[in-house]
Image (spheres, rainbow, N blue to C red):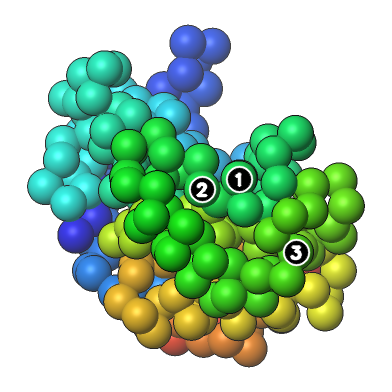
Amino acid sequence: MIEMEDVYKKYPNGVVAVSGLSVRINQGEFVYIVGPSGAGKSTFIKMMYREEKPSKGTIMINGVNLGKLKESKIPHFRRQLGVVFQDFKLLPKLTVYENVAFALEVIEEQPKYIKKRVMETLELVNLKHKARMLPTELSGGEQQRVSIARSIVNSPKVVIADEPTGNLDPETSWEIMKIFEEINTRGTTILMATHNKEIVNTIRHRVIAIENGQIIRDEQRGDYGYES
């Protein structure tokens, strides 16, 4: 499903962010990526959706070798993934419905299918009643739910979430986690980089801890393991 083998990432300024990472993640797993700031988590996550390219080693996702992927093929590859960011990255002039539909319009799905699928997805994230609103009219938690809806509307096999609860209050964070749990029970692989100790320790899943660009711990139903 997802496989990294002896992966290194060295930036032009000489910083080695990732050093000899090897890991395998199977279809349907829910994995937390934890570690202190500057540990290499963001680089690890960004390499998964080819925002960053490995300097050395192999990354395979769904049979695609990301190190050898041509720039022109990256947008097509990313259609297999859902990516959720800490800062939502919604299009401010589009409604909730239009933000989610956009992900299907760019792959030229049929209008009839788009309408049906967008409304199904908005129902899953409990935002069907706010379909006509603009992002600025929503709370932070609602905006993040729109972001999640957009990331899953084309039924990706993998959802990558980079600190998805980082800007949210605790109550809203739990609501967001319920949605991720539901997505995961439907068979989608979830990779989530997080600093949220309480969530990791309460909703137990596999934990991969990264420090100094290396995996120092990989545990099924692990705990956060750091003071926060």
Distance between mark 2 and mark 1 Cα atoms: 5 Å
Distance between mark 3 and mark 2 Cα atoms: 14 Å
Task: Say which of 1 and 144 sits in front.
Answer: 144
- Residue 5: percent from the left, percent from the top? 19, 46
Which residue is situated farthest in the front direction here? Answer: 112
Q: Are marks 3 and 2 in contact (CB under 8 Å)?
A: no
Q: Hey, what amino acid is under mark 3?
A: Lys
Mark 1, residue position: 98
Distance between mark 1 and mark 3 Cα atoms: 12 Å
Asked whether, in this view, residue 119 is left or right of residue 142, the answer is left
Please count the marks in the image: 3
Q: Residue at x 73, y 71 (%)?
A: 129
- Residue 125: percent from the left, percent from the top? 61, 72
Mark 2, residue position: 101
SS class of the residue under badge 2? helix
Mark 3, residue position: 130
Q: Are marks 2 and 1 in contact (CB under 8 Å)?
A: yes
Say which label, 1 or 3, has the lower sequence index. 1
Asked whether, in this view, residue 72 is left or right of residue 223, the answer is left
- Residue 223: percent from the left, percent from the top? 56, 81
Q: Hey, what amino acid is under mark 1?
A: Glu
SS class of the residue under badge 1? helix
Give residue 20's quadrant in the image.
Answer: top left
Binning the other alpha carbons within 10 Å of mark 2 as few (below 14), some (14 to 19) or many (20 upward) gives many
Asked whether, in this view, residue 225 is left or right of residue 23, the answer is right
Q: Is residue 175 above or below residue 129?
A: below
Q: Identify the image quadrant of the N terminus.
A: bottom left
Say which label, 3 or 2, has the lower sequence index. 2
